[in-house]
Image: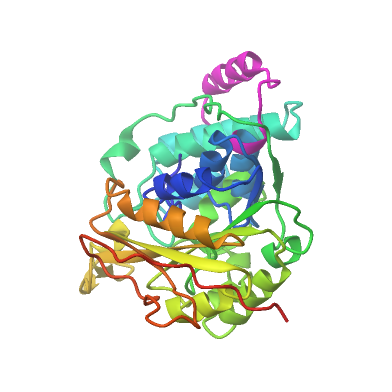
Amino acid sequence: MIKYIGSKRSLVPLIRSVASRLPVRTACDLFAGTTRVGQALRSLGLTVHSNDLATYSEALGQAYIAADASVDRRRLGGLLAELSLLEGKDGYFTEAFCRQARYLQPHNGRRIDAIREAIDHHALDPIERGIVLTSLLEAADRVDSTTGLQMAYLKGWAPRSYGELELRLPGEVAGPAGTVTRLDANLLARQLDVDLVYVDPPYNQHSYFSNYHVWETLVRWDAPESYGVANKRVDCRDRKSAYNSKRAAPAALAGLFGALQAPWLLVSVNNEGFHAVKGLNELLLEHGYVGRIDVDFARYIGARIGIHNPAGDKVGSVTHVRNREHLFLVGPDRDLVTEVVAEAQALAAIPAAVSQAAAISGPSDAAGASSAVAASRAEPPAAAAQGPRPRR
């Protein structure tokens, strides 16, 4: 799986645990990214719909969400072996991302140029194509020279970048085959007919389209015009989501929740993002009973090495090295929300988690209702889920 700042790697065990307790058979990951969450839901036996506007996410979705036992993996393994033997050649990718910029070393860039060009000459259905592109994408990620974001690259070559590009057949994910789309989440929300929706919207001004523009170009293979030291695609300048605007994001999220009809929601936000816990809790009360689990985790490594200018000189200092992720569970069953959140709180052994707390807002009309603000403690108080408000 590729390095990805929004992959939810450390949160997946918790999400999987919570989802396993819910009476659901179908699910949608609206902002799928690397599809980590979708894969976890599929492994529970759910039929998953994976959605994201990124073309690279669509390829990952075909490989890990849509692919099933009907795929001829032996044939695809043979194709990958054939592609691996191709001699490298200079092309757009090598020039743009290995010479003008330094995301990968030229010897691997030349191989990517040859392999990616050859892929388009093979007759592959969408799922097969997604698997082959995912293999190349993951191979490139293993030998890149970044901290996991493509807004910049390392001043000196990362040790892993000296390695050789190696195509590997993406692994199979257990569970029923799902579906994949590349649609605006707010538009798709109106059409969804699923039991559970996982919502992990972009949380700040930096778009994932820009953060992973190299992978977008690798999958699209459209040789776009570029700009700046990072050699970003020119469409990074104007392709901005409402979720990347502090002013527009709350309304966009409110519109999304207003369109969703699924009985169960899982929503994750970051404490550094645009969506404040209190406001989000109030918004979710329109949909059902609300519980919350907070997880403390280490910040993205780029935030821990300081701020540097284009020349690689350090110009800023690190302010903090830990963040808090808030996972909301929303559903129609008050008792089940209460039980599931309490169980999640007891899941102390979450990778990378230092502290964890759960909060379920008490009924607004009950005396002594528990606070909606979570606090770590050895013995959490009994809590009741806060009741839904009538939807207007």
Q: Residue at x 43, y 62 (%)?
A: 151
Is 84 rendered above or below residue 300?
above
Highlighted magenta segment, given as a residue range? 64-89
Residue 155 in view (yes/no):
yes
Is 82 rendered above or below residue 32?
above
Q: Residue at x 32, y 48 (%)?
A: 347
Q: Nearer the viewer, residue 265 or 307?
A: 265
Q: Residue furthest bottom?
A: 247
Is 356 rendered above or below residue 1?
below
When asked about the image quadrant of residue 132, the answer is top right
- Residue 84: percent from the left, percent from the top? 52, 22
Residue 13 magenta-highlighted: no
When asked about the image quadrant of residue 360, the answer is bottom left
Residue 6 in view (yes/no):
no
Is residue 341 rendered to the left or right of residue 183?
Answer: left
- Report the number of discs: 0
- Residue 222: percent from the left, percent from the top? 67, 50
Q: Nearer the viewer, residue 114 or 270?
A: 270
Is residue 359 rendered to the left or right of residue 134?
Answer: left
- Residue 282: percent from the left, percent from the top? 53, 80
Residue 82 magenta-highlighted: yes
Q: Quadrant of the N terminus?
A: top left
Is 158 rendered above or below residue 332?
above
Q: Quadrant of the C terminus?
A: bottom right
When asked about the image quadrant of residue 186, the answer is bottom right
